[in-house]
Amino acid sequence: MQIVDLLSDYTLRTVAAGAATLGLASGSLGSFAVLRRQSLLGDAISHAALPGIALAFLLTGSKAPLVLIIGAALSGWIGALIVMRVVGTTRVKEDAALGIVLSVFFGIGLVLLTSIQKRPDASQAGLDRFLFGQAATLLQRDVVLIASLGAAALLVAGLFWKEFKLLTFDRDFGASLGLAMRALDALLTSVLVIAIVIGLQTVGVVLMAAMVVAPAAAARQWTDRLGVMVLLAGLFGALAGATGAVVSSLGQRIPTGPTIVLCLTVVVLGSLALAPNRGMVWSWLRERRNRRLLHTAVVLEELHDLALRHPGQEHGHSMAVLEAGHAGAHHELEALESRGWARRSSDGLWSITVAGIAEAQRRRDPSDGDEKD
Amino acid sequence: MPPEPTFAIEVNDLTVAYRDKPVLWDIDLEVPAGNLLAIVGPNGAGKSTLIKAILGLVRPAAGQVVVHGRPYSEQRRLVAYVPQRGSVDWDFPTSVLDVVMMGSYRAIGWFRRPGKRERQRAFDALAQVGMQDYAERQISQLSGGQQQRVFLARALVQNATLYLMDEPFQGVDAKTERAIVGVLRELRAAGKTVVVVHHDLETVPEYFDWVFLLNVRRIAVGPVAEVFTDENLRVTYGGRMPLLQRQGGTVAPAPAQAEWDPAI
């Protein structure tokens, strides 16, 4: 609790507000990147932003957040542009182009950062926080900047909502309508660049892509509507961002990026497991239920066969006979008993009931309720 | 003297190349208005590329496209496009109605959302292709044929005069095929022109009035009865084509079509 006392409430609130705001923006706008299969472009942009931060500082000598963000945005944009040019004009495929841009820009950024840190004056201190993020360094003016840029990006996405949807779903059709798809593509990429660079101080260039991709991937599990997906992704991003940032500020020099990514992991795993329809838990339960239904039908069929081969449906059969053809048949026999289709005699032998025979024959007869359209 | 025929579409000297390799070479094509035209040719003949080049989705190395007497760029709103259904991700989070309404996005204009009128037109278009009961469905739940009909409905919403369709019959069920043929005939009855990339030679005489035989170059174009001949098909398909048999005046491919039909 001592650590909490060291930090004033004001700091914590600032950190939480900043991280939640950037999580909201990057999470919701990341939905488009994920749906356009551009998750890795987000990663390339965030890594490509690093040299821009270093250069902005070298050129201006200023560490003002706006200056650094402009530098980051420019070089992130150039990185994205190079990826698109390389894919469009050479035989290099997109994954290779992304890999090249990401590592080359990141490498240049690291070289610049190292040389800046070797300078004798102390003004350079703290630029390395852009690697893994340091939410504790957020000031109120940073939060205001994050909020205004994030709001501007969200506003653009709202204004061009239907065009961005069309661009994401069917670009060629949009172009055939006469909509300026190339310009819209550039605009959406710019929006993505903004959503990324506003998070670099808090989350860091190395892991910022997670802020873009993970909330959207989690949100996709819960809904089949684009609007709901964007809202949910924003919510997940804000939640994970705020939680991670506060946790990291409570400790001493815990990098924020990894903490936020841990929170995102919880959100993603929870969504993959629990979301209705797409969730793994539900599909496992569904599959189990279907398997049980199928097995029950098979055992009913076997009981029916046995009854046909013996005089009188009352003739009992030991569990062993049924287990021989169908391991674990006792579960199914109990299920059949509960529906009144099978019966267990006092000496433990199983037989089919009259209702069971009717059911088995109904299932056998293909003309009954099993018509194809 | 008969009046000048009005062409729904005129393509002049259109050439498209990917990295030095010509995909379409010096294509000339005139389609009189009010016809159903099939573009026919083997795989790699440039059929889809031709449609995309007409629409400006692929940049031609040379050539012009004129729609109803004026350059295509001035006539965009007269042209509707039905892409191959495999060209999009059907797991996209949206509903059938939403996709169909996309056909009205340009007419709605910037910064505005589709309203009641657009919804009604989308419903009408869905009814026209027999999909009115699926309006609220998530698109990932559709079968291939239903996807195709949704794309067709989206183009109908545009209320165009020229329709360009890329393989609408590819791998669809019989019900969808009937629905598409019905729509094609309704469009023709309304005086519209439909250009269809088509794979199934057998149905060309039944479904279409005009045919364009294409294999990188223009082989022949004209009314089906005049142009859809053994000789022209042999030239179009080269050696990969089995002998065709004449049956009652129309051409039908030999039964062994599975060997060369690229749709299979």
Image: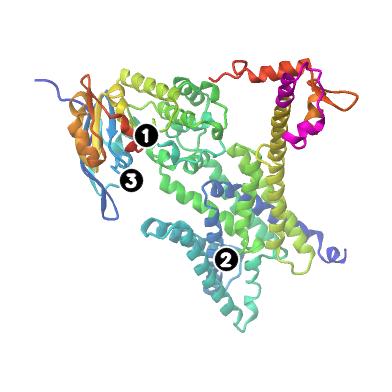
Q: Secondary structure at mark 1?
A: loop
Kindly report which numbered mark, 2 or 3, lies closer to the viewer in this rendering.
3
Q: Is the residue under label 2 in contact with that under label 1 (CB below 8 Å)?
A: no
**Amino acid at pointer 3:** Val
Kindly report which numbered mark, 1 or 2, lies closer to the viewer in this rendering.
1
**Amino acid at pointer 1:** Glu
Give the magenta part as a residue range.
A301-329
- Would you identify the image quadrant in which residue A139 lies? bottom right
Q: Is residue A314 magenta?
A: yes
Please tell me the numbered disc located at residue B58: 3
Q: Which residue is mark 1?
A: B167
Indicate the chain on which mark 3 is placed: B
- Would you identify the image quadrant in which residue B159 lies? top left
Q: Is the residue under label 3 in contact with that under label 2 (CB below 8 Å)?
A: no
* Residue at image location 56% in from the left, 73% down from the top: A110
Identify whether B122 is placed above or below B49.
above
